[in-house]
Image (tube, grey):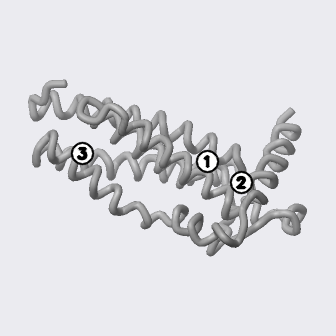
């Protein structure tokens, strides 16, 4: 059963990966670059500061650093435990895939880009939901685009991306709850 699932995953990967064209490669390489969205993160921190204040912003920064470190490290634990090669490192499909990433990496299950972007989207979207009702949907869409970019550039299978997004959503929600607890307990912020 697992073998059949992985076979479907490979077929879906090849289909999605081959939808790309050289016309769009530059855009997707930009999207998959982890530093491309620093301006978005700065805007989100500004919005958190605007609505919660300086002291709360310090709490947010600590919690966000913990959240990204947590998702990143758990991703690495899964990659080392499952040792699933990235599609760009599988010789059997090398002739069928479009590999445009800068580097391949060794293991791919699950995607760190997907988990980190989804954690940031869920965390920020939930914290700012009282002020910007639809922001969470924009951030979830952004996270899905970042996740798809990993398939487009040839470094992750769809299952890697899906599991990364799922783990990121759970992590983002957990750290959102932690932030609310800390803000209530130490800064008397009311929600």
From mark 3 to mark 1, how far is it between C-alphas? 27 Å
Quadrant of the image containing the N terminus:
top right
Tags 2 and 3 in contact by the CB under 8 Å rule? no
Residue identifier under label 3: 60
Vertical placement of residue 80 versus 168, above or below? below
In the rendered image of this protein, does residue 137 appear above or below residue 144?
above
Residue 75 visible in the snapshot: no
- Tell me residue 32's x, y (percent): 55, 62
Name the residue located 88 percent from the left edge and 38 percent from the top edge.
4
Which residue is under mark 1?
78
Left or right side of 138 for 163: right
For label 2, the SS is loop
Image coordinates of residue 100 in percent, x first then y, are 68, 71
Q: Is residue 65 visible?
A: yes
Outermost residue, top direction? 191
x and y, in percent, of residue 42 in the image: 28, 58
Residue at the far front in the pictured view: 23
Residue that appears at 41% across and 38% down: 122
- Name which residue lies at 65% across and 67% down: 105
Looking at the image, residue 15 sits to the left or right of residue 73; the answer is: right
Q: Which marked residue is nearer to the observer: mark 2 or mark 3?
A: 3
Q: Is residue 64 left or right of residue 20?
A: left
Q: Residue 103: percent from the left, percent from the top?
A: 64, 73
Secondary structure found at label 3: helix
Left or right: 125 as drawn, with respect to 117: left
User: Which structural element holds mark 1?
Assistant: helix
């Amino acid at each position: 059963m697992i073998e059949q699932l992985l076979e479907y995953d490979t077929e879906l990967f090849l289909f999605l990966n081959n939808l790309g064209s050289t016309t769009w490669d530059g855009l997707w390489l930009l999207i998959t670059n982890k530093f491309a969205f620093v301006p978005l993160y700065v805007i989100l921190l500004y919005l958190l500061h605007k609505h919660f204040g300086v002291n709360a912003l310090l709490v947010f920064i600590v919690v966000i650093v913990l959240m990204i470190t947590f998702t990143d490290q758990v991703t690495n634990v899964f990659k080392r435990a499952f040792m699933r090669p990235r599609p760009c490192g599988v010789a059997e499909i090398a002739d069928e895939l479009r590999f445009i990433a800068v580097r391949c990496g060794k293991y791919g299950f699950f995607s760190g880009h997907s988990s980190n972007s989804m954690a940031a989207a869920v965390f920020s979207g939930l914290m700012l939901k009282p002020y910007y009702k639809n922001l969470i949907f924009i951030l979830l869409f952004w996270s899905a685009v970042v996740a798809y970019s990993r398939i487009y550039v040839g470094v992750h299978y769809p299952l890697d991306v899906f599991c990364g997004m799922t783990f990121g959503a759970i992590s983002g929600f957990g750290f959102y709850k932690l932030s609310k607890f800390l803000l209530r307990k130490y800064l008397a912020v009311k929600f």
